[in-house]
Amino acid sequence: MPGNLFSLFRGAIVDENKVFIRTSTGRTLTYGEMVSLSGRMANALVTAGVKPGDRVAVQVDKSPEAIVLYLACLRVGAVYLPLNNAYTLAELEYFIGDSEPKIFVATPERAGTIGAIAAKLGVSMLETLATDGTGSLTNRARGLSPEFADVPMKGDELAAILYTSGTTGRSKGAMLSHDNLASNAITLKDLWHFTSRDVLLHALPIFHVHGLFVATNVMLAANGSMIFLPKLDPDDVFRALPEATAMMGVPTFYVRLLQDKRLCRETTGHMRLFVCGSAPLLADTHREWSERTGHAILERYGMSETNMLTSNPYDGERVPGAVGTPLPGVSLRVVDPETGAGVPHGEIGMIEVKGPNVFSGYWRMPEKTKAEFRDDGFFITGDLGRFDERGYVCIVGRGKDLIISGGYNVYPKEVETELDAIPGVIESAVIGIPHKDFGEGVTAVVVAKAGSALNEASALTLLRQRLANFKLPKRIFFVDDLPRNTMGKVQKNVLRETYKNIYAN
Ligand code: MLC
Ligand code: AMP
């Protein structure tokens, strides 16, 4: 492994003049410019007092400079901490308090409000970065030298922290090392045949594993190019397809593009690979995509804590409804969730994993870390699956109370806690209901006090101030009682059955 991950990316550059990122507005950043700008930005971070191990929290819009900031953090040895730009101030307050960043980088529009919270929590530095690359951070970097001696890192030192929500409602920071990220970048580049001739159509957000560590790191390791779209806009996608060779997306991308008449063999004729992950891809969507385009989507499986774990083959059968075989170097076993003993081949159990890609633990949560690792070092994913007759892994459900909506994780407990805090609410239950666009739709069932004037609209208005938009229930139903079993536990399965068809059309 390369020590500092940046040295892997630098070593992969065969052509400095090659475009690394081109935006939908036509701005470009070459590999040579990426190296010099990240050097300047690394110098800017150091002059701002950032030291190896310091956290750099970032909530900005998608831009080439945001990626450069990530790379500058690697070069400095700082810990990059990207935050979803849908997070509310209430959510940010928790992340800032928990991670204690040295510096917070925000969009110019949010700098005022975030600055006030950050200052209250002891973060002395606030910098800005806008989508067009302007802002106090790039101003600071402009006059500085492009030369920067990358800080040597031990492979197990931290490169990034990714917050993922938890079953208790408290988000946990997954600590990822330089080696964790390097191993996946190298493996996936090779497995999916990425080279410097590739152009990746990149419409994902860059604050999660998929858009940052899978898409961007793989392209960096391949010295390939990316077309950066701010979001999944079908018009932008069809404009970019003739120049692209590959795309990575969540199932909602594929579901939405299938609804577009332009999707056919001709419009996808320049592509060599479509990758999907972050949520289950329906076998029907896989089949329909093959029929319309002639391309079999390559589905893979991973998570924030582990990066990628399995993949369907590049050459070979890509099976609808299966996530493929464990990546080289990854050990994956299926066990009885209670005892931890292996289940017979083909039977369903808890998926546990081990490998160079697996994180070292949750930031400042040793108890949580201990609870989610077995004594022999295997990480308990919380996903239920089985091996099929080909040796492919099939994910059949989750042992964790988690909803995945449009590729984003939503833990019911977090939404329930916010609902229960609303005056007039006695209790609530939040469930995921099949949704044709988002895969699962966050749905709340609420018991209100007699005479309360609370309704769906007023509850949503209150929630909107507290929770990121993708966590908001698509529907809230008011009932007299929640169904309970003899132990007094809410029967979410009964609720799921009651509301199962509400998003069918
Ligand atoms: C947006 N909205 C969502 C949503 N995204 N609602 C539920 N789930 C989502 N994921 C809501 C907004 O609140 C808004 O509601 C309305 O939809 C339109 O907002 P938008 O911003 O225009 O959304 P859109 O561009 O349509 O985005 C949908 C999406 C996007 C699915 C394209 O969410 C997306 O890019 N998801 C990818 C997430 C991702 O990268 N996951 C990877 C995690 S890593 P209103 O009411 O305000 O109109 C991981 C590991 C791994 O999981 O294995 O990869
Ligand atoms: P996150 O914590 O956001 O990284 O989400 C990780 C979770 O997404 C995993 O634990 C799985 O439940 C789910 N996931 C990722 N990829 C797939 C896939 N291809 N099929 C089914 N679930 C997936």
Image: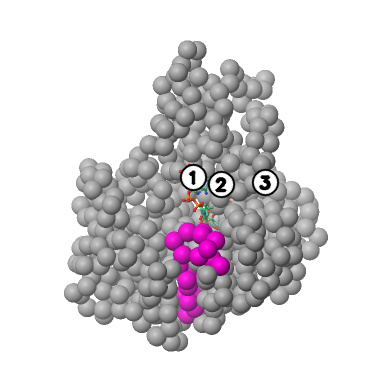
What is the span of residues highlighted in magenta in the rendered image?
212-238
Q: Quadrant of residue 295 in the image?
A: bottom right
| Secondary element at image label 2 | strand
Real-space CA distance between mark 2 and mark 3, rounded to the nearest whole angstrom: 15 Å
221 part of magenta stretch:
yes
Whether pointer 1 and pointer 2 mark residues with C-beta atoms closer than 8 Å, the reply is: yes
Label placed on residue 405: 2
**In terms of depth relative to the viewer, which is nearer, 384 or 337?**
384
Whether pointer 2 and pointer 3 mark residues with C-beta atoms closer than 8 Å, the reply is: no
Q: To which residue does mark 1 refer?
A: 470
125 part of magenta stretch:
no
Within-10-Å neighbours for mark 3: few <14, some 14–19, many 20+: some
State yes or no: Cβ of the residue under disc 2 lies below 8 Å from any atom of ligand 1: yes
Within-10-Å neighbours for mark 2: few <14, some 14–19, many 20+: many
Left-right relation of 483 to 344: left
Where residue 338 sits: x, y (%)?
A: 66, 41
Amino acid type, callout 1: Phe
Discs 2/3, front? 2
Q: How is the image coloured?
A: one colour
Residue displayed at 35% across by 54% down? 59
| Secondary element at image label 3 | strand
Q: To which residue does mark 3 refer?
A: 397
State yes or no: Cβ of the residue under disc 1 lies below 8 Å from any atom of ligand 1: yes
Residue 412: tell me if it is visible: no
Label placed on residue 109: none
